Every structure is written in structure tokens, then in C-alpha cells.
Image (cartoon, grey):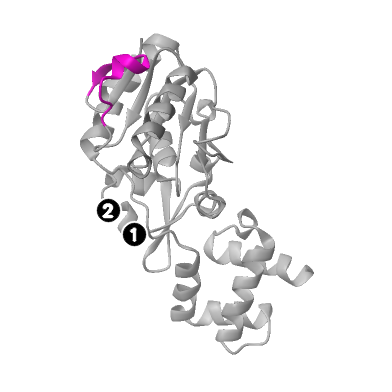
Amino acid sequence: MGDYEIFKDKVFQLTKIDLSCYKERQMKRRIDALITRSNVSGYDEYLRLLKTDQDKLEEFIAYLTINVSEFYRNPEQWQLLEKEMLPYLFERFGQKIKIWSAACSTGDEPYTLVMLLAKFIPMNQIQIIATDIDKQVLEKAQIGLYDEKSLRGLPKEYISKYFTKVGARSYQISEEVKRCVNFRQHNLLKDPYIKDCNLIICRNVMIYFTEEAKVEINKRFCASLQQDGLLFVGSTEQIIAPHTLGFSTFKSFFYKKN
């Protein structure tokens, strides 16, 4: 136990990856498997290997890195959010807006939102609730370590300001961005919804649900929003007859609660 605690500290010093964000039993088991595969005797020896063998360090980082996410997917929609939707929300609700990133997966959407919001308000005023049904992706989101492919669509200003390169192909998001997001496990089909939101983002997940489930979820999103709050959906998830659910179309992919 003590050895692993020291190992976590040393890994953080070496890579800025905080292993404490992972469930200890699962992570310890996976790292033990890596140690065995590397033919070394324990945490100390494995750490020395990571410091001296670049390939082993890359293997270790790749083991923890998120490869399936994509920041700033559909850039024109994020630009619309920045240029028109956020100013509207601030004008309507003031600077303290309540935001829920539903089905947030590996964290790229709530983290992107933090970076956009930081153009308008101080970081210490930003707090986003981000939820997903999958505990493992939430753990990866809390680590905030991404493959460079995940960032290829993100404007360079955000990468240079909020990310640190780790190894040859990975990037660690900054602690100040991570502090702005509160990750929670949540099942859209059965758990209570977050109340009094000003903005809900739920993109690229409705495609997995039946038509009946989509209607029910969108009704519940509407109930979760304050009057004039916005729902931001994905490119293939336009709501048919939004007025029947309590929404009006505000802009493409944005719906306002009537």
C-alpha cells in the first residue's frame, strides 16, 4: 500500500498524471500487469524504467490516455455557442449560469465549455456539472489526459493555454480547467434530473436511444431548464416538433424553453 502511494506521487512528478483520480484497486491491478509484462520486480524498478526508457514511458501513458474523444467537434456549433449563445445566456441570467453537460463521456465537452466561458468570466466563477452513466469514462475524464488526435480540431490558443504536452503524443489538461467541472455518475433513463439549469448540453448520445426514449429525455431536459434556458444538441439530433415538448428552435442545434 505504502509503495503504491509513493509510486503515485513519483508518477505525478514525472508526468503530471494524478493516479488518485482512478479507482485504486482497478488501477493498481492494471499497473501490476504492466510491471509483470516489463519483467521488473516492483514499483521502484518500474519507475526507474519509466525514467530511462522512453518507449516504456509512452506505453504507460498510452495505457491511461483517452483515445476516443474529440474536442470541439463541429467547430461552427461551438463558435455559435461562443459568439451568440453565451452572450444571450449572460444577458438573460447574469454571470452565474448553471450548466449541465449530460452524457459527457471522456470530458471533452465540459472542458471545452470551461475554456469558452473563461473568455467571459473568471475561472473561479465557472462550475459545470458533467454526468455520464459509465464510471470508467468519468475516471478518464477526471484524469484529463488526451491523445493528440483528440485535440486536432481545437483552436491552438486553447492548447497552448490549457494543456501540457506529456510524452510524444499526449496532452494533460490544466488543473485550473479540471477544477471547474464536477463529474457525477448519472443514468438519463432512470435517475432524477438536475434542476434549474440555464444551459444543458447533450450531444451525440441520443442516436443510441429509441424514439420514445428520446421524447421522454427531451421532455425531462425541458423540465430541468429554467424559463428561456437552452438545450444544445448534436448534429444528427434535431428535435422534431420541439413545441410539443415545451421548446422553440432558437438557432440550429439550440432549443429554448418556452
x 56%, y 51%: residue: 135
Of the 4 image quadrants, the one containing the N terminus is: bottom right
Using the numbered discs, state the Cα–Cα distance from disc 2 to disc 1 in whole angstroms: 7 Å
Residue nearest the viewer, comparing 239 with 200: 239
Q: Give the amino acid at mark 2.
A: Arg
Q: In which quarter of the image is residue 38?
A: bottom right
Residue nearest the viewer, comparing 89 with 104: 104
x 29%, y 19%: residue: 242
Q: Where is residue 194 in the image (x, y as percent from the top left)?
A: 55, 26
Residue corresponding to mark 1: 148
Q: Where is residue 41 in the image (x, y as percent from the top left)?
A: 67, 87
Q: What segment carries the magenta color?
A: 238-251
x 46%, y 35%: residue: 102
How many numbered callouts? 2
Residue 2 in sight? yes
Of the 4 image quadrants, the one containing the C terminus is: top left
Q: Position of residue 48 (x, y in %)?
A: 60, 81
**Tag 2 near tag 1, CB within 8 Å:** yes
36, above or below 192, in the image:
below
Residue nearest the viewer, comparing 154 with 160: 154
Residue nearest the viewer, comparing 164 with 102: 102
Residue corresponding to mark 2: 152
Q: Where is residue 79 in the image (x, y as percent from the top left)?
A: 25, 32
Mark 2, secondary structure of its residue: loop
40 inside magenta stretch: no
Mark 1, secondary structure of its residue: helix
Using residue 252 as the reference point, say whether residue 68 is left or right of it.
Answer: right
241 inside magenta stretch: yes
Q: Residues within 10 Å of mark 2 (few under 14, many from 20)?
A: some
